[in-house]
Every structure is written in structure tokens, then in C-alpha cells.
Image (cartoon, grey):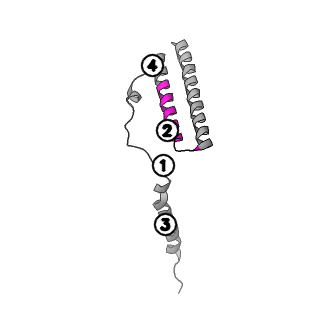
Amino acid sequence: MRKNRRPHLLLLPLLLAAGLAAHAPVFAAEEDVSQEDPARWYQGDDTAQLHYKTLVKEARAAGAQALQECKALKGAEAKGCRKEARENQNSDLARAKRILKTRSAAE
């Protein structure tokens, strides 16, 4: 008499899926929840000038955070990191000015 092998065929994919699911949290990015959201995230910026001020604050905060992350590096790598952080901040500030100009013209 021949045994039915179909239950084994179903068991293998289930075990494989369970094994992959067990490792899924390893791929998730860590989230830093030690700090609360900045109050500025919840302040309205209805006018062009207020929106510009918000964009400038965000650009400076992002630049400061990027420079802080550069402190872990050494030598030429740190220098390049700081240069990139400054370039990104300057780019963000220039973008804020363009947005201010566009919104001011529309108002």
C-alpha cells in the first residue's frame, strides 16, 4: 500500500515561511523614541514667512544632526562627512528661499 505524501508537501512551505517570519524583526529599522517630537512640528505655518521660518529651522536641525553623526568618524572620512552636511544644509536653505519667493508672489 502506498503512503500519501501530500501532507509532507504542505508542511515544507509552512516551515519555511515560519522560519523566515522568525527572522523578520532583524530587518526592521530601529526607531529612536527617546526624544519627543519638536514643538515646531505642531505649530501652524499659514503664511509664506512662517513657512520659511519652519523650513529654516528644519534645515538647521537636520544640519546639526548630520554634523553630530560625523563626530563618530575620523580623518578624511569625517572631513568629507562635514562637507556633505554643510552642502546639504546650504541646499536646504536655498530651497527654503525659493519656496518663500514662490509663496510670497502667490499671496
Q: Residues within 10 Å of mark 3 (few under 14, many from 20)?
A: few
The percent position of residue 51, horizontal first and vertical second, equals 47, 21
Separation of disc 4 and disc 1 at Cα?
33 Å
Q: Residues within 10 Å of mark 2 (few under 14, many from 20)?
A: few
Q: Amino acid at mark 4?
A: Leu
Q: Which mark is residue 50?
A: 4
- The stretch drawn in magenta includes residue 96: no
Q: Is residue 31 above or below residue 83?
A: below
Q: Mark 2 or mark 3: which is in front?
A: 2
Q: Residue furthest front?
A: 75
The residue singled out by tag 2 in the image is: 68
Q: Residues within 10 Å of mark 4 (few under 14, many from 20)?
A: some
Along the line of sight, which residue is nearer the eye, 26 or 74? 74
Asked if disc 4 and disc 2 are in contact, CB closer than 8 Å, the reply is: no
Q: Amino acid at mark 2?
A: Gln
Which comes before the other along the chain, label 1 or label 2?
A: 1
| Magenta stretch bounds | 55-74
Q: Which mark is residue 14?
A: 3
Asked if disc 1 and disc 3 are in contact, CB closer than 8 Å, the reply is: no
The percent position of residue 42, horizontal first and vertical second, equals 38, 28
